[in-house]
Amino acid sequence: MESASQVAEPLQIFRDTVVLLEKSAEAIVFEKKEEFHLKVMSTRNALIGSLIREAEEYVDPENKNRLIERLIKEAEECVNPEDKLEFGLQVTFDLDDYITELMSKALACSNGGRERIKAQWRELRDRVETSKRRRELLKPVSELEFVATLRWMIERGVEEDLGRLRQSKEDPPYTSEEIEELFEIAERRIGERVNDSDHVAKKSEGGYQQEKVVAPNMQDLGWTAFQSHLPRLLREASGKWVAFHGDRQAALGNSKQEVYERLLQMKCPLEEVVVRRIKPLGPPLNLQRFRRSRVQ
């Protein structure tokens, strides 16, 4: 009869390895301790990557969403308290990429109800953008991104953002005359929106939904342009990151951070931009062949 857990023994081996590593560290000469620590960390990171790949391969497809949820939740429990906000921000960035790619694939395969589905995907991406901006207000990745977040608050901030805005204003991560001015404008604009009866009526009547349509339309153009230019980009800059604003290639860089910094320098509206890594998208799904294989 099989045991309840098939990983009990490997798990114990790992725990014994941790104990032995601690003993080994005590025997390392002082001038080699930092080198030893870095090598251990590198090897451990490789193990984490391998275990994630094993989980992806062997976990049932029906359970993969639950696996992702557990990875996010349990990873947060292991993060230092002072790093939890930044960890949440990085997870939000990853989800933004995940949702953007899934949205493209879902719309490409959708048949009836395309506009309704598109509106729902846009609403989800707006939620991601809002979550990202609220976290960046307290833990920005750069001064340029912080300025972009303050500008976003000016245009889209709501009542629940006032507390975060004032908290950040009391102890700002960056200071400049421009930032001080943006704080004042953002606080005033949000206050006006909260107290202005015309503003409240406009929101209840769906006026904001009309405002939201502008950015995703530019992103639709950006996705079309990205897919159109992908063969050339794969030849010329495979592995790099690219940004499209509408049908125009706006920036190219070695990392996502580098691309976003260039976009901010150009004062490009980030909610209208598609940023993707240059890599093959994978073969399209042949629905007729898939259905025939299911019948067989």
Image: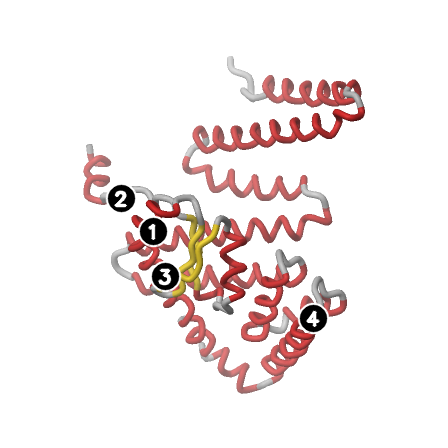
The quarter holding residue 61 reads top left
Q: Looking at the picture, which amino acid does disc 2 mark? A: Leu
Q: Position of residue 105 (x, y in %)?
A: 34, 51
Q: Quadrant of residue 229?
A: bottom left
Residue shown at the point (39%, 47%) measured from the top left:
237
Q: Amino acid at mark 1?
A: Lys
Where the C terminus falls, by quadrant? top left
Residue in front for this viewpoint, 255 or 84: 255
Residue 148 seen anywhere in this rendered image of the structure = yes
Residue that mark 1 sits on? 105
Q: Which mark is residue 176?
A: 4
Judged left or right of residue 135, residue 273 is: left
The residue labelled by disc 3 is 222
Amino acid beneath label 4: Ser
Q: CA distance from mark 2 to mark 4?
A: 51 Å
Q: CA distance from mark 2 to mark 3?
A: 22 Å
Cβ atoms at labels 4 and 1 below 8 Å apart: no
Q: Position of residue 165 (x, y in %)?
A: 67, 69
Disc with the residue nearer the chain's start (3 vs 1): 1
Read off the residue under disc 2: 285
CA distance for labels 2 and 1? 10 Å
The amino acid marked with disc number 3 is: Gly
Alpha carbons under labels 3 and 4: distance apart: 33 Å
Task: Identify the residue at horizontal 51%, vertical 83% (top origin).
Answer: 201
Of marks 3 and 4, the one in the foreground = 4
